[in-house]
């Protein structure tokens, strides 16, 4: 499946299979990059508002705010990705930073490396808040898998994130805590091992 260029402006990156929680069958979604475009801006804004009504702790509005700020400041180091279903609905979102490091942690191995930081990652609360009523399974894992592929393709030395969802990130293979902080990192020499394990779970 690919985005219809007449209807949507975001950039197609790859196809992703996600399990429908109701039918227990895999459905194809598009992993896309959102662009500086009024349609994308509206779509991200509406998604954030909708998710916040379901779960105020959702990061949908945080991703939108990062997106809006990056556009206003012409910050080309930040990029925004999502999983979009066949109906054109966003099911997962992520904000990425590849510029000056924003996450503060000390590790000699990372001192002169360029970051691939996951600033925010969020899935549709309909599929996370209530297991009995959820629409899809494994949205977060599918999103992580595509982001690791992206970092690998860009030859990034590591991925870093601030772990605000321990139950989720503790299950992500090879994402290790840095000291006593809430920072987790995945080093480049573990990309393939991480991807192989996530593929086995899919």
Image (tube, rainbow, N blue to C red):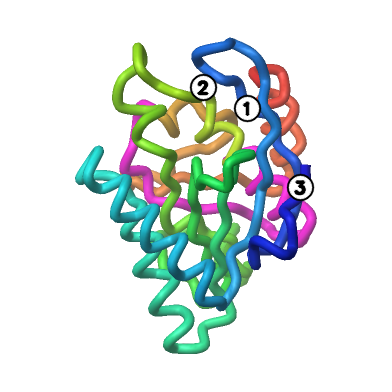
Residue shown at the point (71%, 18%) measured from the top left: 200
Return the residue nearer the eye: 72 or 126.
Answer: 126
Q: Position of residue 202 (x, y in %)?
A: 66, 21
Q: Circle 3: is it few (<14), some (14-19), or many (20+) Cα within 10 Å? A: some
Q: Position of residue 160 (x, y in %)?
A: 51, 53
Label for residue 14?
Answer: 3
Q: Is residue 127 above or below residue 58?
A: above
Q: CA distance from mark 3 to mark 2?
A: 19 Å
Q: Quadrant of residue 154?
A: bottom right
Task: Give SS at disc 1.
Answer: strand
Q: Position of residue 30 (x, y in %)?
A: 68, 45
Q: Are the residues flagged by discs 1 and 2 in contact, CB closer than 8 Å?
A: yes
Return the residue nearer the eye: 144 or 17.
Answer: 17
Residue, disc 1? 18
Q: Circle 2: is it few (<14), some (14-19), or many (20+) Cα within 10 Å? A: some
Q: Is residue 39 above or below residue 15?
A: below
Q: Position of residue 140 (x, y in %)?
A: 50, 35
Task: Give SS at disc 3.
Answer: strand
Left or right position of 88 against 121: right
Task: Give SS at disc 2.
Answer: strand
Left or right position of 43 against 114: left
Residue shown at the point (61%, 34%) measured from the top left: 142
- Magenta run includes residue 161: yes
Task: Specify which label sits upstream in the sequence, 1 or 2.
Answer: 1
Label for residue 137?
Answer: 2
Residue shown at the point (50%, 53%) measured from the top left: 94
Q: CA distance from mark 1 to mark 3?
A: 13 Å
Q: Which residues are magenta?
A: 144-167
Q: Are the residues flagged by discs 3 and 2 in contact, CB closer than 8 Å?
A: no
Q: CA distance from mark 1 to mark 2?
A: 7 Å
Quadrant location of the N terminus in the rendered image:
top right
Label for residue 169?
Answer: none
């Amino acid at each position: 499946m690919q985005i219809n260029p007449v209807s949507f402006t975001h950039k197609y990156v790859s196809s992703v299979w996600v399990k429908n929680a109701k039918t227990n069958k895999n459905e194809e979604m598009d992993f896309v990059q959102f662009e500086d475009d009024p349609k994308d801006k509206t779509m991200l804004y509406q998604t954030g508002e909708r998710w916040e009504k379901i779960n105020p702790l959702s990061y949908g509005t945080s991703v939108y705010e990062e997106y809006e700020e990056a556009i206003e400041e012409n910050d080309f180091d930040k990029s925004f990705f999502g999983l979009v279903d066949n109906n054109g609905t966003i099911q997962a979102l992520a904000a990425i930073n590849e510029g000056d490091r924003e996450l503060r942690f000390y590790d000699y191995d990372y001192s002169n490396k360029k970051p691939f930081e996951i600033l925010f990652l969020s899935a549709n609360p309909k599929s996370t808040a209530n297991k009995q009523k959820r629409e899809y399974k494994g949205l977060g894992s599918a999103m992580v898998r595509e982001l690791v592929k992206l970092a690998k393709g860009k030859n990034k030395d590591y991925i870093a994130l601030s772990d605000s969802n321990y139950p989720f990130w503790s299950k992500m293979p090879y994402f290790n805590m840095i000291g006593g902080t809430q920072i987790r990192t995945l080093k480049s020499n573990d990309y393939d091992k991480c991807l192989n394990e996530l593929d086995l779970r899919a």
